[in-house]
Image (cartoon, grey):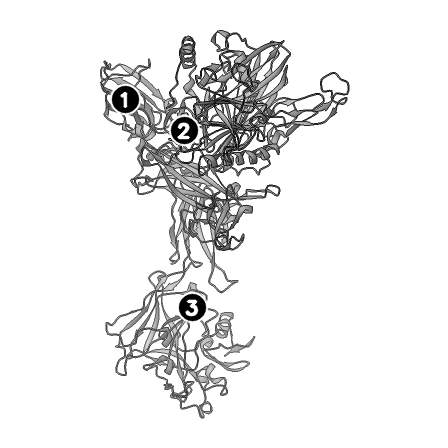
Amino acid sequence: MKVRRYSKSNILFLPILVFALLSLAFTGIDKGKGGGKGSQNTPSLKAGDSYRMFINNLNIPMNRVGVMGDVSIFDPETGSAGSGGKYDGVVFLFSGGFFMSGLTNGSLWSNAVASASRIQDYVQGTVASGRNDPRAQMYVLRANEGDFAASWTEWKDAVALGAYYYDGDGSGTYDPIDVNGNGKWDPTEDRPDLIGDETVWCVYNDGTDPALRRFNDVSPQGIEVRQTVFGFNSKSFVGNMIFVRYSLLNTGTVADVMDSVYFGVWADPDLGDYTDDLVGSDTLLNAGYVYNDGDDADYGSNPPTFLIDFFQGPVSYIPGVTFIDNNNNGVWDEGIDTPVMNGHNVQGQVRGIANYPGATNLGLSSFVHYIQSHPTHGDPNTRQEARNYMLGRNRVGVDLNPCNWEFGEVRGGVACADVNPKFSYSGNPVTNVGWINNGPNDQRQMSNTGPFKLEKNKPVDIVVAYVVGRGNNALNSITVAKQYSEIAQTIFDSNFPSPPPPPPARPTTKTGADDAGNGFIDIQINTSDLFKYSARDTVLAVNKRVKGIYLTAYRTNSKQQVVNGVDNSQLLATYVINDSLLSLYELLGNGNQNLKLADPGSGYRLDSVKYADPDQGRIRVRVSVDPFTGNPLVLGKNYYFTATVVTVNHEATFLKSAYDRDKSIVYGPAGDYIVRSGGIEEYETAIIPVYYGENIYAPATTGSTAQQSGGASSGQVKYVVVENDKLTGDNYSVEFKKNNVSRKPYKVYYSLRNTTKGTTLIDSSAVFDTNSTDISGKVQEGFILKIKSVEPSLGTTRYSNATRWYDNFSATSSTGIFYGGDDITIGATRFGLPRNATTNPSTVISADRLRQVQIVFDAANPGKAYRYLMGFSGNNFTRDRIFRYAEGVAAADTTNRGPVGKLGEGFVDVPFKAYVSDPKTGEKRQLAVGFIETSSVLRDPQGRPLKGTPDGIWDPGDSVLASGEMILLFDGDYDATGSQIQYKGGNFSTGVLWADVNQGFAIPAGATINGTAVTDDQRKIAASPYFNMLYAVGLQRKDATSFFANGDTLTIPVSVYPYTDNDKFTFTTKSGGNLTQDEKQSLFNKVNVFPNPLLGVNPAGSFNNQTPDNPYVTFSNLPTDVTIKIYSLSGILVRTLGTADKLSPTSPFLRWNLENESGLRVASGMYIALVTAPGFGEKILKFGIILPQKQIQRF
């Protein structure tokens, strides 16, 4: 802590100081709101009398009378009140402000806002309205609140006090109306003076009474300062600076013109340890800065440099310099005088740059420092001493002499007589050349500009920047800070041409519980605006796009990584665009690489088109346990989260592997990438507090699984609720339709219908997804449909007899169960036959025909099968491919091709029958079957004889590949007469045509058989290889003696059934996601108060870093409208609480701070609470309060 020292000469000021402090106490200086990064407050325009800007890497409190840093308000980094501007959690600025001095009617005046020097000459408000104007507050604008936010309307009060605005409609008055109702600001509409991501505005005037001033011979001059502080939400170098615009106005109450005015940006910097600070100036940058020349006790081995830079000095017209005074009257006359130079006023992208021909912007006129309480070079005590400092002299008005100045020396061979004494320590500490400060101390520094005039009602705008740079050591930090300043000056001079930041992430949160009662917090972000963002600038070589979003949980309401030695943050999830950039590394100034964004894996890569679609792009993270303990969420406890948007400048990005290899710059191929420093930026939201259980009467809904009301598929239909308020409470059905246009692969479409209204919401969709955590996609009446994708497959074959007679299945030996089609994965495995390595699939069978089939073996009760012979039809080149129906094989066909038993018989007895016996579909029917036999004279490619036995008796022997005797199960009902022409062919009206099961056969158009027309289905089946075969079954004996026993069954099960035209799923949503009245009544019946009893302190206070001396009890499970009357046991009404006392009107929680109606703390004891809610009735609670005993300390 910085300890202020008071000398004897300061004793007379103590009464004044005490009075001032008491005044500040009564103005409520600690009632300001923290904001920006880590704010614990709901965003609000009017921030009271103080505010903490924490939009980026700088954490700076400020108040409405111009003090920067030396303002004690809540600090989310520490969880308690504190002061000082911080970087990396350590103070770099004790206090900031300004000095101003000029001549009014020839009389010198000086005033200042310099709290560390005990000077406060300004009070809140305008000269006209005075310090008691309730509008004299700090006004806050935030880009992340969006266009036409409530703050835009409230800015009217700021405009009335002198704030700038953009007059889009040219009316001359500020009226921010969304004229076209598109929700976006258009250039023809008014808007406030929002610059960057956050703007803080206030106005104050030099109205402090002379008796309360340090310079008590100076009266108020009627000067107003309209102060604007703005910054950018960035973690890059732009996040290491904030901008302060001082708009100086002479109201004319004392004089129309104030001459020879100087303005000095003043600071009491403390780089960690305040005793080791050194200062310097840079005339080329118009900057002054503070630095260390070695390690710092607080910052360590690489303390930063804090630099204050004049980005825009006052506009000044100088005859003979900035313009040629043609009429010699000493003032600029437009249209008469000739401009030589051009001044400007940078006002932001919306208001543009105002140009002033014949003028210039003054730069740094001097830089000085003084030392706290130093006897000869300390705080100024008079208006003249202040003026002397502003002129670049010492306190008594003597120019400094660099040759013998006690606090510095000229080094590096520079002639000390040639050094300009007005710019103290203008040398380069990095190279150790020039005038260098050599006395580390508790410094005050002032960067001055002037002289200029303040003319009545003509504002003079001065813009400075606070810039912090931190390198790898103390002196390198100077280089870094100056580099940041140079880049920022270029950007400023171009009116911030750097591409705009991405739109902010706007997370919404809702709490709820699943059907099992497990609680959760949903964090949802719409991504369309983020992933449509593209910012390009060819001059600055910028091509910036959003790469991803990550969500972080915090243990406390602070963004510090560690709080009290305990980890305070936990990464919840990272989502990235699915492009060629995987993990991203930042290239540091020293050449090292730092992993900035790790590739989260395939499950978290997002399709850029889908997630940029406003109807589909959204992500949701569901937190179902405490991120830090893994325990269930606690009702009534606060949980803290942030969302961070990550952008990448693709112009500064290159492939890591190529760069690591030989420093090649390659862009395009997939892989890890390196991003140059500043090329990857993070835009983080303020901390989002979620009070678990706050939505208990309108909780987040998980959705549900639909009921299968038809069909046998193994699929599943779910609906996931995305927008509770749009749920209709209607009935819905999901039905499926086979895609008959494209046979392969097997596909179905599904439709979603609101059966209550009879409307179709989704028609013919083929998008299947069961990931309930993925809520992208088009929302239908509040929900997204999730349809499980199924891949049909067969189960493990079962045989009824423990003693199996056939070999284990192997596709290479053509044994097993082979699906007849090729429209699903299992159809890719084909069976082989003698001299046929593979067989062709059926073109008519499809996966929707999959059924469980049983083959019953019984030689005593045979069935009938269609018999096909291979090797007898066609010539020597084609006969291996023709499997002719046996009735069509004549004696002549056997010549040189071996004998055929049962010649001419095509429909023969077989010792088995096949049945569909499917428990899922409920079907039971006998199937038509067939089998194959091959010629006995066939040989394999090596000339060895095969084992064909075409005797009309099914017996596969010990090798199906050698015998060819496969069983064919057709998807057709059994016909005991064997007259199914699609399986046998026959004597058609066009001639005799026998079936070929291997290749199919074409029945001529118009052909009839026995006077009966051939149907289209018969024609299609006949033309297909293997007809409509559902399964081919290859069984071969283990040995010559092994065979089936009568009554044995072989079961071919289906493990996964596909969707078919018969499938139907139904569900009903809950209207608005609301609870039923019975469910709400059940909640009200559980109204409670906790902790009960309250013993001294409420342990829940530790969740929010609250002080133990502020105990409270919480009433829970309350509906929106409620009244709570609290009585003592004697029946005295102690306090009446209502909806207005809850955290929010819809919150189920109400905290009582143990105060009675008079605001006094109640005594320990037992109390009765009568809880009344319209529509629910009454609930009586009894609870105890035991407060700690307090004693006055005696010393």
Whether residue 727 can be seen here: no
Badge 3 crowding class, 10 Å Cα cut-off, few under 14, some 14 to 19, many 20 or more, is some
What residue sits 45% from the left and 68% below the top? 822
Can you identify the residue that label 3 sits on? 827
What residue sits 62% from the left and 11% below the top? 252
Which of the two residues, 141 or 757, is positioned nearer the viewer here? Answer: 141
Residue 565: x and y in percent read 31, 35
Q: Quadrant of residue 1186?
A: top left
**Looking at the picture, which amino acid does disc 3 mark?**
Gly
Residue 1088: x and y in percent read 28, 28
Name the element at disc 1.
Answer: strand
**Looking at the picture, which amino acid does disc 1 mark?**
Ala
Which of the two residues, 40 or 124, is positioned nearer the viewer here? Answer: 124
Does 167 sit left or right of 970 as displayed?
A: right
- Quarter of the image containing the N terminus? top left
Proximity of marks 1 and 3: CB atoms separated by less than 8 Å: no
Can you identify the residue that label 1 sits on? 1169
Q: Which mark is residue 272?
A: 2
Relative to 812, residue 922 above or below: above
Q: Which mark is residue 969?
A: none
- Quarter of the image containing the C terminus? top left
Comes first in the chain, label 1 or label 3: 3
Q: Quadrant of residue 518?
A: top left
Residue 1140: x and y in percent read 39, 22
**Looking at the picture, which amino acid does disc 2 mark?**
Gly
